[in-house]
Image: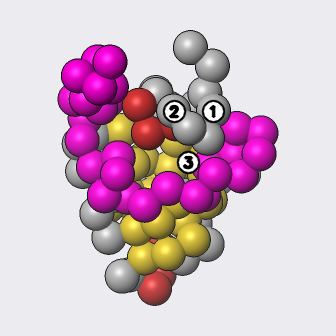
Amino acid sequence: MNVTPENIIYNELIGLRVSVVGSTDPSLLGVSGTVVDETANMLVVSDAGSARRKMIPKMASRFSFFIPEEVVVEGREIALSPEERLKRLQRRH
């Protein structure tokens, strides 16, 4: 399935470019890179120019994904494991 703005919350996020555009933690604003791992509550983001990885809490953040157009997603919409998001999509159909 191709990732589109309409189905992004039901797809795999690992490998997508992301930027934090809103957060209750001001130190996370502007963090950007590639999603390298995901849990139910966190996105792990790695900047290509650095070996450091940032753990970003989903519920406290708003993300901008680039697929290639920019799509803004509220963290609470993706605050499930990837498997649970897929189950939610299957229940909708």
The 10 Å Cα crowd at callout 2, few under 14, some 14 to 19, many 20 or more, is few
Residue 92 belongs to magenta span? yes
Q: Nearer the viewer, mark 3 or mark 1?
A: 1
Q: Secondary structure at mark 2?
A: loop
Hey, which residue is sitting farthest bottom in the picture? 26
Q: Which residues are magenta?
A: 64-93
| Residue underneath mark 1 | 4
Q: Which residue occupies the foreground of this view, 19 or 62?
A: 62
Q: Identify the coloring.
A: secondary structure
| Residue underneath mark 3 | 46
Q: Do the numbered discs 3 and 1 sit on residues whose CB atoms are within 8 Å?
A: no
Name the residue located 50 percent from the left edge and 56 percent from the top edge.
73
In which quadrant of the rendered view does residue 40 lie?
A: top left
Hey, which residue is sitting farthest front in the picture? 93
Q: Tag 1 or tag 3, which sits nearer the N-term?
A: 1
In this picture, residue 38 sits left or right of residue 54: left
Position above or below: 22 against 83: below
Name the residue located 47 percent from the left edge and 66 percent from the top edge.
62
In this picture, residue 34 sits left or right of residue 59: right
Name the residue located 47 percent from the left edge and 81 percent from the top edge.
27
| Residue underneath mark 2 | 7
Q: Which residue occupies the foreground of this view, 49 or 24?
A: 24
Percent coordinates x, y for residue 35 in the rendering: 52, 41
Q: Tag 2 or tag 3, which sits nearer the N-term?
A: 2
In which quadrant of the rendered view does residue 64 lie?
A: bottom right
* Kind of residue sitting beneath label 2: Asn
Percent coordinates x, y for residue 7 in the rendering: 51, 33
Q: Which residue occupies the foreground of this view, 13 or 51?
A: 13
